[in-house]
Image (tube, rainbow, N blue to C red):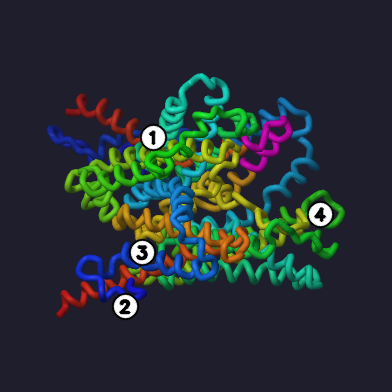
Amino acid sequence: MNKFPLVAKLNMGKLKGRRETSLVLLILLLLAIVTLRSPGFVSGKNIQRIVNDTSILVMVSLGQFFVILAGGIDLSVGSMIGLSGMAASLMNEANPAIPAIVVLLAGVVIGTALGTLNGFIVAFGKVPPIIVTLGTLSVFRGLTFVLSKGQWVTAHEMTESYMKLPHGNLFGISNLIWWGLLVSVALYYLSNYTRSGREVYAIGGNKTAAKFVGVNERKINMMIFTLSGMVSGLAGVMWTARYAAAVNETATGFELQTVAACVIGGVSIAGGSGAVPGVILGALFIGIINNALPVINLSPFYQLLIQGAIVLFAMLVNTLSSRRRAHKLLQERLS
Amino acid sequence: MGETQSPMKEEPGRKLVSTTRLIDESSLKERLILLFTQWEVILGLLLILVFAYFINITPYFLDAFNLLNTTFTFTEKAVMALPMIFIIMAGDIDISVASIIALSSFAMGYASANGAGTVSLVVIGLLVGLAAGLFNGIFVTKVGMPAIAVTLATQSIFRGIPQAVLGDKAYTQYPASFAYFGQGYVGDTFIPFSLVFFLILALVMGFVLHRTRFGRKIYAIGNAKEAARFSGVNVERIRFINFALMGLFCGIASVLLTSRIGSTRPNIALGYDMEVITLVVLGGVSISGGKGNLFGVLMAIFLVGYLKFGMGLVNLSAKAMIITTGTLLIVAVLLPGFLNTAKSWRKLKRQQQVSPEKV
């Protein structure tokens, strides 16, 4: 994967040929193009706005990343965001006296429980993740409607402190960005420096081999789906608080964006390869595109098409580059 | 193999495993257990249960006209379920089918707005569906990307095109005769055209799956892709044909749906992919491939269709239906595993009971 042969040659050693490097270059190129149309786009304030907009996507994509890494997929993240966000908002509406941080915690716990349910069915029912999460995608969404009785929770029904959760700021950076950073750092640590994290890679790489070296697949499956639910729960609270509204359709179709972020970030959909920084960059890439569309005068209705095309292209690049790598390895071995 | 007696008599002092056939498979009880743990029979019982329940609580359920008319609401999904059986049977999946409908319907709407007649509309609808299926097929089999990945991307692309062009607008102008496909009846009867058409398609697809070499090859691929390849099955070609068929049938479904509702919006058929996959999996087709038959899916189609109809009659909300189908999907994939575990547990129990006295 080397789109800019000249530039990439300047980068030495490990940086060369890595997905993260080319993504950073691609993002810079994208920013440059948009800046030509609208010089204000790369101002510090706007950049912070884009990162803020993308923080939720970053969190949930990282949860999705672990599931895809193990060779699965979690299609229910959008519905988990919707359900836990709605539950937290209803709790906030019903009893404004409860501190916002407790409501936040409740949202995370609900998301975690939903994720654990997914993990339980996958791990103990031996059902493919795509089918389980396809089912819970509708079950969770339906439960959201049941819980809310079809009603919305609007801004004036939420407490000030609840809506402050993502909006408040620390050292001039919004809480939402801090949350995104916290999740990123924690999951980077999990993936690279813990036994469980490496076991996820092992399962995704070769399930049978992983089993023979003593990786407990059930435990890992429970962990990754619970994790995906946990970040979705956090994202649900942040989403409803940020937009000051809990609607029943919150985050419908969001699962595609999270998978897209992973794929653009170089995660193989077949599992076993990919890394946290790539996923974060992939999510930021999507965030920049979404924010750039109105600037270059394209209607938001183009978003779906552009996103789909980018995902297809990124997957094509992933497939071809991994094939080229395999080919190269084979030739090295033969010579 | 179900005999209790082995021709070889037990020699004294030697235990022969073959003489201790643990479960007498020819007995009535065992036959009944075998029968009622068969997936199609369970579905049939469920269907009877649904009928009995709704007949009991509402007088409007058991009415020939109602029962026939309600098939309008699920024949499109039923048509899509047929090639989906092939796809899932061969171990693939296609989650772009609802978007193919949107794309095909959009093409028909565009053509109709530019004065195309009914026949050319149908041809356009089918061709666009086929083209979308070929697109998926090329990426899955020629480029070699996983089906879930390709169709996840094309899910956005195929629906993204109508959304980008139409935005929040819609095509609503269709020729009057175009309405026949999704709204018409056969002759002077109350039998919907779309139902008859679906049944014919089901017959054809059932024949292909269960009576042709092509069908047997699909089973072979689903059971062991590599083994099928080594025994001379052109795996990639068959998977490619499957995706092409899927596209074509989505085109057919799109004609039926567009004709029935008489308009094309970008969100047409949203969520159908999940429902179609549910039907197929509920029908007993194993998602890991190689298991199931078309008859089971047929049962599942009518089961879900009439369950929804009944729930609608007693004023249960659409959301309750969504929860029901989602739960059904999960239960349907969990249950065969449980049944198998229960069966082998029972066998083990028998073995433990029998062996001490024989020793």
Task: Look at the image and tell me in which quarter the N terminus of chain A lies.
Answer: bottom left
**Residue type at numbered disc 2:** Pro
Q: Earlier in the sequence, mark 2 or mark 1?
A: 2
- Give how far apart the Cα atoms at labels 1 and 3 are: 35 Å
Judged left or right of residue B29, residue A324 is: left
Residue B251: give x, y in percent of width and height: 65, 64
Amino acid residing under circle 3: Val
Q: Nearer the viewer, mark 4 or mark 2?
A: 2
Q: Residues within 10 Å of mark 3 (few under 14, many from 20)?
A: some
Q: Which mark is residue A5?
A: 2
Label drawn at residue A116? 1
Looking at the image, which residue sits at the far right?
Answer: B188
Asked whether the beta carbons under mark 2 and mark 1 sit within 8 Å of each other, the answer is no
In this rendering, does residue B210 appear at all? no
Mostly what secondary structure, the magenta segment? helix
Per the rendered image, the range of residues in magenta is B303-319
Q: Residue at x 41, y 43 (%)?
A: A172
